[in-house]
Amino acid sequence: MISRLPGLSLPERVWNTARRWAVAWWRILYLGAVVLVLVLSPSSYGKGTRRALARHLYLDTAPVLLGFTVLAALISLVLTRIVVVTALSYGLSRYALEMVIRVLVLELIPLTAALFVAMRCTIPNGAQLSRLRQAGRFDALRSQGSDPVRIELLPRVIAGVFACVTLAALSCVVALVLAYLGVYGFNMAGLSGYTRMFGQVFSPSVTMVFVLKTLFFSLAVALIPMAAGLYDSGERAQPDSELGGLARMFAVLLLIETASLMGNYY
């Protein structure tokens, strides 16, 4: 949407909007590079940083782990039942389980985990980071000779990535188990066929796309809200709102999902 600033012509408003978006994307890329360097630097894991990192890892993962796993289990049961009944009615029962795994495990659960972590953890953390910056916490750390990005931002980013990957991995395992139980019940009769079908679905290329997609999802939901909270827009009249950060995050998630679909099916 083109912002409406009083006294500016349409080309000027278009230019201002395009410039703000370009600056926002550049800041996200720059922050990602900075975080990558800090993650690989042993000096980033001092005593104070380790304590903050452990606290954020626990707070961003443990409280939501059970709830999201139960949600993923319910979705798995409902989707498995719908697909199996529909496939039986059309005489395509042998494709039902493969369809469940492709739709649920490969596509739905990683995206749902990323959105869940974003809404529950990283977006509130970005807002908290903005409040700390406005309250003078960053200036106080700089006056003490500390890096506010290393102290306040890095633990939140790592915790967001860890929470997203953990929720996606655990929920995929639960979904695979429940999909088997939904089709074969509590017996081992279909285990050999299930493992063979699983190996056919998760070929090396599909597995690589799945791992990369989950990783990029986690990086997107961890970095973009932090960038929105860390930086000012540079213009008092048009601050970089949380809505803009949400729009950029959803755009990145959509691009990642589109790229993964092309990699898997084209």
Image (cartoon, grey):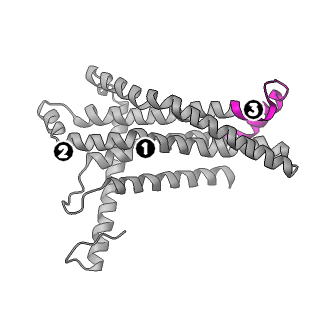
At x 29%, y 78%, the residue is 11
Residue 180: which disc?
3
Q: Few, some or many C-alpha atoms within 10 Å of disc 1 (few <14, some 14-19, many ≥20)?
A: few
Q: Name the magenta segment's main secondary structure.
A: helix
Q: Determine the CA span between mark 2 and mark 1.
A: 22 Å
**CB atoms at circles 2 and 1 under 8 Å apart?**
no
**CB atoms at circles 2 and 3 under 8 Å apart?**
no
Looking at the rendered image, the disc whose residue lies closer to the viewer, 2 or 1, is 1
Q: Is residue 47 magenta?
A: no
Among the 4 quarters of the image, the one containing residue 31: top left
Give the left or right position of residue 24, taking residue 84 as reference: left
Give the left or right position of residue 5, taking residue 172 as reference: left
Read off the magenta span.
Answer: 177-204
Image location (x, y in percent) of residue 73: 63, 34
Image location (x, y in percent) of residue 1: 37, 68
Q: Determine the CA span between mark 3 and mark 1.
A: 30 Å
Residue position for label 2: 134
* Residue 25 visible somewhere in the drawing: no
Q: Secondary structure at mark 2?
A: helix
Residue position for label 1: 119
Residue sticking out furthest to the top: 47
Image location (x, y in percent) of residue 125: 33, 39
* Residue 16 visible somewhere in the drawing: yes
Q: Amino acid at mark 2?
A: Gln
